[in-house]
Amino acid sequence: MRLDGDNFHIDIWHDINNANDIEFHVHCGGKKYFGWAFTLTGIEALMRKDRLTGESSRGTYFWVVGLIVVESISKEILVQAISDLVKSNGNSLESIFPIVDV
């Protein structure tokens, strides 16, 4: 699925209905970036799982490269969040998301 914003677009290849996390690519300024959006509910669920499995020092921390935390996963919120990041970073998202080789 492609979501269009001003000066960028987002590619999503998973269903976003009832999702607590989603991987995506942002195309902006001739570059392609990898990103991941999580809700707080999604992060909490992963940390609970990690407490049981022993991962991440028994769920005491959580980290993901290229992560943004959003209120909920929806087309509108993803476009709104990325739009704000693009505007506040001058179309340069390297400090937020890793670049994907094209």
Image (cartoon, rainbow, N blue to C red):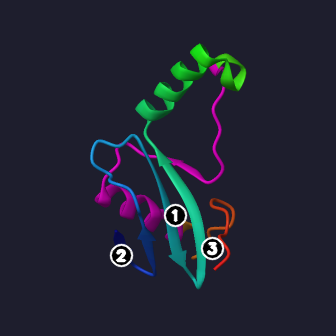
Who comes first in sequence, dot 1 or dot 2?
2
Indicate the secondary structure of the residue bearing disc 3.
Answer: loop
Q: Residue farthest to the right?
A: 57
Number of numbered discs on residues: 3
Which quarter of the rendered picture does the C terminus lie within? bottom right
- Crowdedness near tag 3: few (<14), some (14–19) or many (≥20) residues, C-alpha within 10 Å: some
Asked if the residue under mark 2 is in contact with the one under mark 1, i.e. CB atoms within 8 Å, the reply is no
Type of the residue with mark 3: Ser
The x, y position of residue 42, in whole percent, is 44, 34
Q: What is the span of residues highlighted in magenta in the rendered image? A: 59-87
In the drawing, what numbered circle is on residue 92? Answer: 3
Type of the residue with mark 1: Leu
The x, y position of residue 17, in whole percent, is 27, 48
Residue 19 falls in which quadrant of the image? top left
Q: Residue farthest to the bottom?
A: 30
On whether residue 52 falls in the magenta region, the answer is: no
C-alpha separation, residue under disc 2 versus residue under disc 3: 17 Å
The x, y position of residue 70, in whole percent, is 43, 46
Q: For the point 41% across and 31% down, which residue is it?
A: 41
Q: For the point 63% across and 61% down, which residue is it?
A: 97
Q: Is residue 95 left or right of residue 23?
A: right
Type of the residue with mark 2: Asp
Indicate the secondary structure of the residue bearing disc 1.
Answer: helix
Which label sits in the foreground, 1 or 2? 2
Q: For the point 34% across and 68% down, which residue is it?
A: 1
Say if 82 sits above or below 30 in the image. Answer: above
Who comes first in sequence, dot 3 or dot 1?
1
Which label sits in the foreground, 2 or 3? 2
In the drawing, what numbered circle is on residue 4? Answer: 2
- Crowdedness near tag 2: few (<14), some (14–19) or many (≥20) residues, C-alpha within 10 Å: some
Residue under label 1, please give it. Answer: 85
